[in-house]
């Protein structure tokens, strides 16, 4: 829970998003080296497949979501601002 608390406060994300932070922490920890299983990650020990971390992004980073042409009028914005709370 210390990791969750740090993630929420570090990026000033409202506390109502704590379940997303917990899910992301568990996901990251399962793909990180640990002393419990030497030489492999917990995910690799479980599935025998080395996990990829190429898709990781910063928790709480700002992103822009595209609005399709069919959902906007001529002068409406083409995207809106949001915050990434987990995997892409």
Image (cartoon, helix red, strand yellow):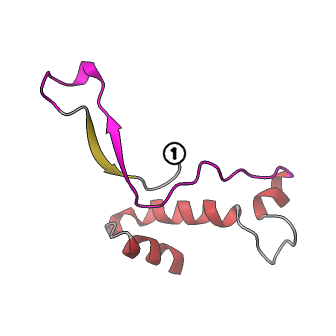
SS for tag 1?
loop
The residue at the far top in this view is 70
Residue 63 % position (x, y): 37, 48
In front: 48, or 76? 76
Residue 71 % position (x, y): 24, 24
Point 66% across, 53% down: residue: 53
Residue 40: in sight, yes or no?
yes
Q: Is residue 62 magenta?
A: yes
10 Å neighbourhood of mark 1: few (<14), some, or many (≥20)? few
Point 85% across, 71% down: residue: 37
Q: Is residue 6 left or right of residue 46?
A: left
> Vertically, is 70 above or below 82?
above
Residue 46 % position (x, y): 82, 57
Q: In this view, does 76 lie to the left or right of 44?
A: left
Point 66% across, 67% down: residue: 29
Q: Is residue 86 magenta?
A: no
The residue at the far bottom in this view is 2
> Vertically, is 12 above or below 81?
below
Count every numbered label the image shows and give the total: 1
**What segment is highlighted magenta in the picture?**
48-76
In front: 75, or 4? 75
Q: Name the residue under label 1.
A: 88
Q: Is the magenta stretch mostly helix, strand or loop?
A: loop
> Vertically, is 38 above or below 41?
below
Residue 77 % position (x, y): 19, 34
Residue 1: in sight, yes or no?
no
Point 87% across, 72% down: residue: 38
Which image quadrant is residue 79 in? top left
In front: 68, or 47? 68
């Amino acid at each position: 829970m210390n990791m969750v608390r740090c993630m929420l406060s570090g990026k000033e994300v409202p506390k109502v998003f704590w379940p997303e932070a917990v899910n992301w922490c568990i996901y990251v920890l399962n793909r990180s080296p640990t002393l419990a299983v030497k030489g492999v990650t917990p995910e690799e020990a479980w599935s025998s497949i080395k996990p990829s971390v190429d898709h990781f992004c910063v928790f709480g980073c700002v992103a822009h979501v595209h609005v399709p042409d069919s959902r906007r009028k001529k002068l409406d914005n083409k995207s809106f601002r949001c915050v990434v709370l987990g995997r892409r």
